[in-house]
């Protein structure tokens, strides 16, 4: 096998969710593309990596100092949805159901991986709330052990803010899930978040 091909496969397989087989398919596809298209792609990736910024307000990716969501006067600036990663913002935005602002933590607390609360953008969040105007914080954190730890830590950090409503996205059993295959933590959340059937 070509050393150049092996090198490209090695680099592509560093991406999350890309194994060596997929990396090989991508490399072969790149080889079949027009050279100008490949050059455009690599320039775009390089420019993205060099020029992208993090919003100074919410830590979301942005081309400017403040991201378009935070700068939008039509959004509800009294509500902040706290998420782990930028991808979570995109997932929520794709629903077209949420009209408030976001705060991207940049991960979850994970002592096993050496990620402590100080490694996350929690202080930036509390500074935003302290400036006033925020009425509700929605915690949209994963249900993993690390996510639960982060959720608990955030709740303790936010409780001192008088009048601040702290909510969490509903958790429980997904549509189509069979109860016997659902883990205990998910069942616990489902029972706690139960609602009356009308």
Image: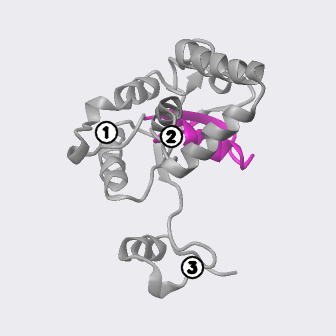
Residue at (45% x, 50% y) in the render: 141
In this figure, which residue is indicated by the disc labeled 2?
Answer: 1
- The residue tagged 1 is 157
Q: Which residue appears at 35% of the width and 32% of the height?
A: 120
Q: Measure the C-alpha gap from mark 3 to mark 2.
A: 45 Å
Is disc 3 surrounded by few (<14), some (14 to 19) or many (20+) residues within 10 Å?
Answer: few
Q: Quadrant of residue 46?
A: top right
- N-terminal of the pair, mark 1 or mark 2, is 2
Q: Residues within 10 Å of mark 1 (few under 14, many from 20)?
A: some
Which residue is at 57% across, 12% downward? 51
Q: Which residues are magenta?
A: 79-105
Disc 3, SS: loop
Residue 21 percent location from the top left of the image? 54, 51
Instruction: Tell me where residue 2 appears, x and y as whole percent.
Output: 51, 34
Q: Nearer the viewer, residue 196 or 102?
A: 102
- Mark sitting earlier along the chain (1/3): 1
Q: Which image quarter: residue 47?
A: top right
Horizontal side of 140 relative to 155 (left or right) equals right
Q: Which quadrant, please, contains the C terminus?
A: bottom right
Q: Of the two numbered discs 3 and 2 on the same chain, state the one appearing first in sequence.
A: 2
State if disc 2 and disc 1 touch (CB < 8 Å): no
Depth check: 18 or 107 in front? 18
Magenta run includes residue 102: yes
Specify the quadrant of the image occupied by residue 78: top right
């Amino acid at each position: 096998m070509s050393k150049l091909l092996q090198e490209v496969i090695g680099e592509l397989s560093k991406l999350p969710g890309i194994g060596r087989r997929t990396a090989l398919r991508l490399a072969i596809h790149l080889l079949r593309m027009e050279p100008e298209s490949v050059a455009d792609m690599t320039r775009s990736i390089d420019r993205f990596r060099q020029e992208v910024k993090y919003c100074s307000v919410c830590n979301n990716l942005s081309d400017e100092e403040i991201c378009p969501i935070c700068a939008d006067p039509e959004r509800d600036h009294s509500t902040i949805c706290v998420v782990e990663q930028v991808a979570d913002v995109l997932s929520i935005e794709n629903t077209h159901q949420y009209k408030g602002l976001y705060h991207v933590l940049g991960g979850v607390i994970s002592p096993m991986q050496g990620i402590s609360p100080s490694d996350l953008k929690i202080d930036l969040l509390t500074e935003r709330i302290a400036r006033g105007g925020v009425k509700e914080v929605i915690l949209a954190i994963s249900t993993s052990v690390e996510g639960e730890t982060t959720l608990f830590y955030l709740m303790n950090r936010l409780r001192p803010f008088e009048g601040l409503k702290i909510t969490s996205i509903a958790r429980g059993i997904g549509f189509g899930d069979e109860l016997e295959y659902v883990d205990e933590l998910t069942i616990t959340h489902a029972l706690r978040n139960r609602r009356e059937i009308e």
